């Protein structure tokens, strides 16, 4: 009886410790990053290649051509990506990273967005052009319980 109770307690603690684990983003190859920098769907390519795609949904189409301009993706680790390029002003996206560290998400941003014309604020919650209002990507990082949300818009 004591042995069964002990095994039950061990299993309970191992399940609890696994549920609080933080995921790690795989490090892409240098050649992948170089190719992705010139792609308008680098996030989808990265997550699909390194994590595996689970589902894809069309959210919106251009009215004149019926081409898709907004999609939502979900990947095997629970990451969700919503991307909208329906506006002439540029692209907007939201990426939800469940159970990832802020440092991993910042590294992801730097892999694909880092340039000499943008900078982080002190708390690393915003990455944007050095001159406010300049063309480029404006990225915001929000920390919530058990997830990090990245919103960004890129345009002129």
Image (cartoon, helix red, strand yellow):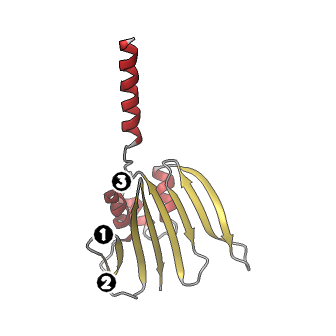
Q: Which residue is mark 3?
A: 27
Quarter-of-image position of residue 68: bottom right
Q: Which x, y percent locates residue 42?
A: 48, 64
Q: Which x, y percent locates residue 113?
A: 38, 71
Query: Mark 2 or mark 1: which is in front?
Result: 1
Quick check: 13 above or below 61? above
For disc 3, the neighbor class at 10 Å (few under 14, some 14 to 19, many from 20) is few
Q: Which x, y percent locates residue 90?
A: 53, 80
Q: Which x, y percent locates residue 9?
A: 37, 25
For disc 2, the neighbor class at 10 Å (few under 14, some 14 to 19, many from 20) is some
Q: Which residue is mark 2?
A: 130
Nearer to us in this view, 58 or 151 = 151
| Mark 2 vs 1, N-terminal side | 1
Q: Which residue is mark 1?
A: 124
SS for dot 2: loop
Asked if the residue at tag 2 contacts the one at tag 3, i.e. Cβ–Cβ closer than 8 Å, the answer is no
Query: Mark 3 or mark 1: which is in front?
Result: 1
Quarter-of-image position of residue 149: bottom left
């Amino acid at each position: 009886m004591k042995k069964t109770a002990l095994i039950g307690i061990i299993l309970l603690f191992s399940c609890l410790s696994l549920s609080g684990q933080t995921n790690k983003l795989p490090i892409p190859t240098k050649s992948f990053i170089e190719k992705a920098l010139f792609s308008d769907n680098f996030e989808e390519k990265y997550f699909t290649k390194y994590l595996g795609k689970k589902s894809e949904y069309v959210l919106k189409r251009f009215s004149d051509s019926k081409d898709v301009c907004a999609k939502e993706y979900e990947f095997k680790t629970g990451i969700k990506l919503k991307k909208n390029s329906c506006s002439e002003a540029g692209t907007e996206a939201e990426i939800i990273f469940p159970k990832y560290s802020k440092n991993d998400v910042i590294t992801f941003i730097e892999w694909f967005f880092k340039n000499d014309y943008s900078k982080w604020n002190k708390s690393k919650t915003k990455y944007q052009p050095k001159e406010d209002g300049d063309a480029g990507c404006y990225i915001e990082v929000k920390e919530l319980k058990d997830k990090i949300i990245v919103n960004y818009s890129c345009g002129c």
